[in-house]
Structures are given as structure tokens and as C-alpha cells.
Image (cartoon, rainbow, N blue to C red):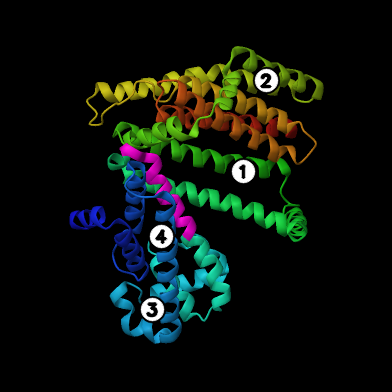
Amino acid sequence: MSYLITLFEQHSYLILFLGIFLELMALPISGEFLMSYAGYFVFQGKMNYILALFTVFVSGGVGITVTYWIGKAGGYKLIENYGKYIHLGPERYKKTAAWFERSGSKLLVFAYFIPGIRHFTGYISGISKMPFRKFILPAYTGSFLWGLCFITLGKVLGSRWEVFHQAASKYFIIFIIGLAVLIVGYLAYRFYKVPIKNLFIDLIKWLTNRLKTIRKTEFFLIFLTLVLIGMVTLMLGMAQDYLYNEFTQFNEIAEYIVKSAGYMNWMKGFVVFQTPMAIASIIAITIIRIWSKGRNRVLEYLLLIVSILGGRLFHQSVIQIFSYLQSIGFVGKFHSANFPDINATIIIIIYGTCLFLLVRHSKKNYMSIIVPLFGLLLLMGVTIVNIASTDLLPSDILGGYVYGSVWIFFNFLLFEMLRLVLENY
């Protein structure tokens, strides 16, 4: 690899072109490393940003086109005779081809971001006799997006590239996949609004018929139980990462990206949601809404009180557990005394509980979607502001959200079960 880097420094564009081309031919070369390193060179002024993007686009396009025609000419015999040399045996081919068949040509756009898949994309498309006209647009679009993302990543990381480019690439891929899912979902709704609407109507009718024997409240309890199990699993995973001090790279990447590119002045407005006035307002609105609804007032006021007041006790218990583990000589290193962050824990407990009670009293179905989305947007904004303007570690904030979520979903489940008992007896 050191020899490759030396060559890259001397012949940047040529090595970038050959590296991407050879990786798509299924040779063991890391194209993501080369592209992010090219972005680092762009940051240093050694390469031109537009020319680097163009190089990757052309190289990726040529590479995947060549493998497409090789696959189309060789057919399945290519897999039987030579697949083992590029780790694409018949078994792996069948699994990947089945995935392509289910997803169609659209998968080509995102296949570049999936390690172990992008190397075979062209071969499989050719072997499966996908029409070239259908192949070329998503394949070339994916090539451009792939280069754009990783060259830009290297440029954004700049002087810190050498420190955590591998970890940044991993988190960036997760972000890209999540973003791609959102974009595809939006475009699907934009162009297929009527079929999707009809599909949801049919799905709701089907669920209604299937759940006639299950009460609405009982079904809701099942949902809360599954969410609670998921949050507890995540909480335990974060506890393990904290105890073994495995948040270091995550914190470095999150802080660097937010402070260098992700923070804008208009986001300062999210600070308002942490003020005592905003918190008191959402609690007051919830109290009034519960009173005006007139059903199970005592139970819901009790849920509000227990969740909010008990949240601080829950947080203190978590801190005590970590302190106890430290006192008995636990092997892990405790990099932060503020994990999970108390303010993040309280914020998600208060807003989560209040929004839950407000949505529960709403007769409009769309509110059950809009309100949670609003809550997520609020948390994202508050998180970015706190990372950019305070010394809080991102892992402490995230830990506060996760541990607070465990507490409120435990209370939601407990009080919904109590509600069910009271209604039946």
C-alpha cells in the first residue's frame, strides 16, 4: 500500500483512474481509499476537485462497462470456470443475482457503496442479459455519486484525513445508504403517488381484517414491547462501547464534521427548545390537553409525573452503576464522567412523554407520523447545536437519548398495561 501511495503522489490522476478501473474488474484494490486520498490531495491543492471527480466518473464508467460486456459475452460459464478467482462462485452469484432481480436496475446506483457487491455488478448485469440501455444510466449515475461522496469526504476531512479516514468511510457509507433510502422513498412517492396510496389503503384494510380478533390496545402493547426490547438492546450495546472506550473515533468524526461543515447559524434557534420556558410550555400544553380530553386524567397525569421526575432518578442510577463498575476495578477505561448526558436524557424524556400523550389524544391519523418526525428533527437540531457550541461529547448526548428512550418506553408500556387492566375491571 505504501508503494501505491508513493505512485499516487507522483501520478495522481493516472493511479486514481487505474485503481478504480481495476477494483471494478474485481481486483483487491480499495477504490474508496484512493478516492478519499484524492480528496485529501484536493484539500492540499495538489489535485483539482472537478478533474478528480471526472477521472473517477470516467474510470468507473469504463470499468463497469467492460465487466458488463465480459459478463454478457462469457455468460454463466464465466462463473463456473473463473468465478472462484474473483470470489464469485456459483453460490454467491445466485444470491447476488437474485437480489438484483428483485431490486431491478435501480440497485446499480447504490451497488458502488456496498463492499463485496460493486466488484461484481457489471459481470452479473451482463450475465443476466440486462439490456445495455437499461444498464448504462443507473451504472454511470452510481459511478458519479460514488466518486462525489468519497472525494468530497477526503476534502472535508482535510488535515484530519490521516487520523480517521477508515472510520469516517464506514460512518459515511451508513449515512449514504440512509440518505439513499429517503431519496428513493421520496421519488417513489413523487412519481407513484396514486399506486402507493392505493397500496396503503389495501394494506390498512388487510390489517383491519387480520386484527379484528386483537384489540387495538393489545396491538399497541405489542408495538411498545418490541420498541422497548430494541432500545434496551441498543442501551446495553452502548454501555459496552462506553466501558471499553470505543467511542473515540465516533466522537472525533462527529465533532469534526459538525464543526467544519454541518453547523449553520440558523441552527442556533434550536437552543430555544432547551430553555426552561420551552420545556414548561410543552408540559403546560400537555397538561391542558389531558384535562380537556377528560378520560383517564389521573392515569395520564401520573404517567407525566413519573416519567419526568423519575427520569432523573433513573439517570442517577445509571451513573451509580458505572461508578460501581469502576470501583471494583473494571478493565474498561472511562473516558467521560458525563455518560449518559443528563440534559439529553431529560430533554428526550420530557419531549418524548409530552408528544406521546399529545399524539395519543389526537383523532387525526397523520399526526402519528408528523409529530414523531418533528421530534426527530428537534433532537437532531439540538444535538448539532450542543456539539458545535459546547464541550459535550457526541457519545454522551447520544447515550442520553438512548437511555432516556428506554425509560420513557418502559413507562409507556407499564401505564398502557395499567390502562388496559382498569378498562377491563
Q: Is residue 425 visible?
A: no
Comparing labels 3 and 4, the label whose residue is closer to the camera: 4
Q: Secondary structure at mark 2?
A: helix
In the rendered structure, which segment of residues is drawn in magenta? 144-160
Q: Secondary structure at mark 4?
A: helix
How far apart marks 2 and 1 lie (CA) works out to 25 Å
The circle drawn on residue 56 is: 4
- Would you call the spot at circle 2 few (<14 residues within 10 Å), some (14-19), or many (20 or more)? some
Name the residue located 36 percent from the left edge and 67 percent from the top edge: 21
Q: Secondary structure at mark 3?
A: helix
Secondary structure mostly seen in the magenta stretch: helix
Query: Left or right: 129 with respect to 64?
Result: right
Going from N to C along the chain, the mark reached first, 3 or 2, is: 3
Which residue in the protein does label 1 denote?
A: 223
Name the residue located 61 percent from the left edge and 44 percent from the top edge: 222
* Residue 158 belongs to the span the image colors magenta: yes
Three-letter code for the amino acid on which mark 1 is drawn: Phe
Which residue in the protein does label 3 denote?
A: 90
Which residue in the protein does label 2 denote?
A: 282
- Would you call the spot at circle 1 few (<14 residues within 10 Å), some (14-19), or many (20 or more)? few
Going from N to C along the chain, the mark reached first, 4 or 2, is: 4
Three-letter code for the amino acid on which mark 4 is drawn: Val
Three-letter code for the amino acid on which mark 3 is drawn: Pro
Q: Quadrant of residue 317?
A: top left
Going from N to C along the chain, the mark reached first, 3 or 1, is: 3
Three-letter code for the amino acid on which mark 2 is drawn: Ile
Query: Left or right: 326 with respect to 233?
Result: left
